[in-house]
């Protein structure tokens, strides 16, 4: 069940603003890995307005889009996006590139909050490892189905990456990225064979070369 409890312990230890962090795009053959860091500045209001927030994978595309637009307009929800390019993924591997994207998202959120004289005190991240020790942080396996903070981050990251892949598909329609988001579907794999590899493909991933 989704809960604030996993972050409340951190709040008691380190301060009032705990960020939730999640990523999307570890498995695709093309496109960046994208992470989001979310801060909820009013927990009670968030629970009242977003009681149906859940892991992005359990929501329809329409519902993810609706929640994303609501987050953008919500004064007490702040978020920032970080990404790592296919070139960076090939250079440092997908695990390290994911950590890089998460760190960039946290840095972006910290900078955003700084303008309002606030700062992240700690963070909670989906998975089994923390991306940076520059801030106190904890990892939570299946965190996107246990923590509202992480679930919100998963929704924003998913919507932003899907929109980006849809934009890329306008110039590379053969690969079907508007539907497969860069994952290795049959159509995508066949397009790689017939049309070749694009600058947006991850050259170190099986099925690309």
Image: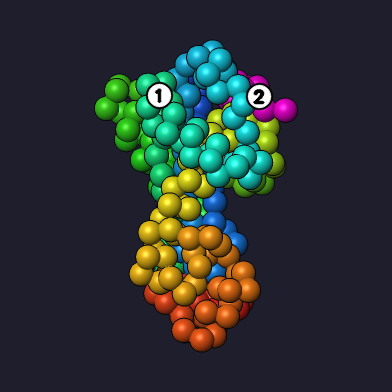
Task: Decide which of 177, 44 is in the foreground and name it.
Answer: 177
Instruction: Indicate which disc residue 74 carries.
Output: 1
* Magenta stretch in the rendered image: 1-11
Q: Residue at x 52, y 79 (%)?
A: 191
Secondary element at image label 2: loop
Q: Quadrant of the N terminus?
A: top right
**Eyeballing the image, is 10 above or below 101?**
above
Q: Quadrant of the C terminus?
A: bottom right
Q: Residue at x 31, y 28 (%)?
A: 114
Q: Can the viewer see residue 139?
A: no
Task: Decide which of 60, 50 is in the foreground and name it.
Answer: 60
**Eyeballing the image, is 77 above or below 139?**
above
Provide residue 189's location: percent of width, then percent of height.
Answer: 58, 77
Q: Residue furthest left?
A: 115
Q: Which residue is mark 2?
A: 3
Q: Residue at x 43, y 40 (%)?
A: 106
Marks 2 and 1, how far apart at CA: 20 Å
Q: Residue furthest bottom?
A: 194
For mark 2, does the 10 Å Cα neighbourhood hold few (<14), some (14 to 19), or many (20 or more) residues?
some
Q: Assess whether residue 62 is covered by the magenta stretch.
A: no
Choose top left, top right, bottom left or bottom right for residue 148. Answer: top right
Choose top left, top right, bottom left or bottom right for residue 28. Answer: bottom right
With 70 as the anchor, is 2 left or right in this view?
right
The reply to whether the C-beta atoms of the residues labelled 2 and 1 are less than 8 Å apart is no
Mark in the foreground, 2 or 1? 1
Provide residue 165's location: percent of width, then percent of height.
Answer: 44, 59
Provide residue 185's location: percent of width, then percent of height.
Answer: 62, 69
Q: Residue at x 46, y 80 (%)?
A: 197
Task: Decide which of 53, 187 is in the foreground and name it.
Answer: 187
């Amino acid at each position: 069940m989704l809960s604030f409890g996993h972050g409340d312990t951190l709040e008691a230890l380190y301060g009032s603003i705990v960020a939730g962090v999640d990523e999307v795009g570890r498995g695709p053959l093309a496109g960046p890995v994208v992470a989001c860091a979310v801060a909820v500045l009013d927990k009670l209001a968030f629970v009242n307005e977003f009681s149906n927030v859940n892991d992005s994978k359990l929501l329809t595309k329409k519902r993810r889009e609706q929640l994303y637009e609501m987050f953008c307009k919500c004064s007490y929800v702040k978020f920032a996006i970080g990404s790592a390019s296919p070139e960076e993924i090939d250079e440092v591997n997908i695990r390290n590139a994911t950590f890089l994207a998460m760190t960039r998202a946290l840095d972006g959120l910290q900078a955003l909050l700084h303008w309002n004289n606030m700062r992240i005190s700690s963070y909670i991240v989906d998975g089994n490892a923390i991306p940076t020790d520059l801030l106190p942080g904890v990892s939570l396996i299946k965190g996107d189905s246990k923590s509202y903070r992480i679930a919100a981050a998963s929704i924003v990251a998913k919507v932003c990456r899907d929109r980006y892949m849809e934009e890329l598909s306008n110039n590379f329609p053969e690969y079907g990225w508007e539907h497969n988001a860069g994952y290795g579907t049959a159509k995508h794999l066949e397009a790689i064979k017939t049309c070749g590899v694009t600058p947006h493909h991850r050259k170190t991933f099986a099925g690309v070369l």
